[in-house]
Amino acid sequence: MGKKRKHVEVEAPAAKKDDTAPERPKRTLLGWKDKPENQQESTGFRNREKVLVTCSRRINYRYRHLMLNLVSVLPHCKKDNKVESKATKGATLNELVELKSCSSCLFFECRKHKDLYLWMSKCPNGPSVKFLVNAVHTMEELKLTGNHLKGSRPLLTFSSNFDKDPHWKLLKEMITQIFGTPKEHRKSKPYHDHVFVFSIVDDHIWFRNYQISCPHTGADKIDRGGLEKMTLIEVGPRFCLNPIKIFGGSFGGPTLYENPFYVSPNQIRSLEKRQKAGKYAKKVKAKTRRKMHEMTNPMETDEFADMWKE
């Protein structure tokens, strides 16, 4: 028999190196995506709230300045051209909000160059609120000493009355979403140096804007929690919101709430005219009574009336 051959271990051929170029990362709307696909991104909620601010045609200069003041203190808002105040303004505004990639709208509607109405709406499904704006004072008019950083995020404070009735709770939630600047917004700054105050007095919402002032000199810093040393300085603007109606849709729809104490400015002006007309009617009646009195009580003839004529 022949000898058995020894089994020689044969090494496997080495794998050829891949000389091809690395795969190009995918490009997205937010930039280049360098993360591997198997790595899942965080699923946390990110606030992408954007507010469209616009007004109607033939608006008063004072109300236009109020709108510009709000635009300056809301870094997450977008300003647009004027919209005609017609019956079809709801559809037009909803289309504008969609084109501007916004989710809310603040529409200043001026009537008769005197009355200012504010529409606050969540587009396109609602709800929406219509306010009558009173006691308007702009920043240029007040000339207050307060001053805060432009683009900083505000703190929102509400009075305890907002938790009493359901319609106030709804308004509180809408105001929080519209006036609250989203975190890490590209136009905002990561500071809280002013406060938006919303308080209910006589069924009206009063708005104030205050700067948080911290008195310190040089490199001295205030300790955390040192609220006693902080003060509030008013910045402006000021205005008062009188809620009229709350609608289920955007700029219309079923009525969810109607203010029973609301009186339109037209009725107030008509009552003032009636009061003035009442004063004139009293004067006319007084004249007629005087004439009747003179006719019923004639003066006696004077014996010496013709003495000096001769």
Image: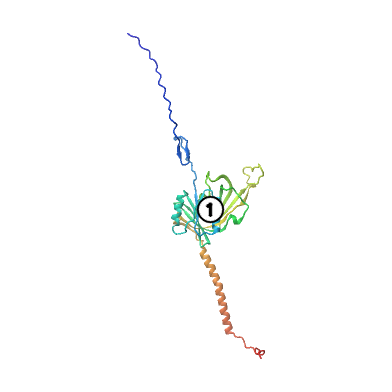
Quadrant location, the C terminus:
bottom right
Q: Give percent across and percent down for residue 306.
A: 65, 90
The answer to whether 215 is drawn above or below residue 283 in the figure is above
Towards the viewer: 309 or 6: 309
Instruction: Single out the residue that lies furthest toward the top.
Output: 1
The outermost residue toward the left is: 1
Crowding at dot 1, Cα within 10 Å, few <14 / some 14-19 / many 20+, comes out as some
Above or below, 273 relative to 191: below
Asked if one can make out residue 205 in the rendered structure from this viewpoint, the answer is no
Quarter occupied by the N terminus: top left
What residue is shown at x 57% (from left), y 79% (from top)? 289
Number of marks in picture: 1
Quarter of the view holding residue 2: top left
**Residue tagged 1:** 162
Residue 54 coordinates in the image, percent (x, y): 50, 54
Q: Which residue is drawn at 61% across and 48% down?
A: 212
Q: Which amino acid does label 1 sit on?
A: Phe
Q: Can residue 269 be seen in this view?
A: yes
Q: What element carries label 1?
A: helix
Q: Residue at x 57, y 81 (%)?
A: 291
**Image coordinates for residue 136, horizontal then vertical, percent:** 56, 58
Q: Quadrant of residue 286?
A: bottom right
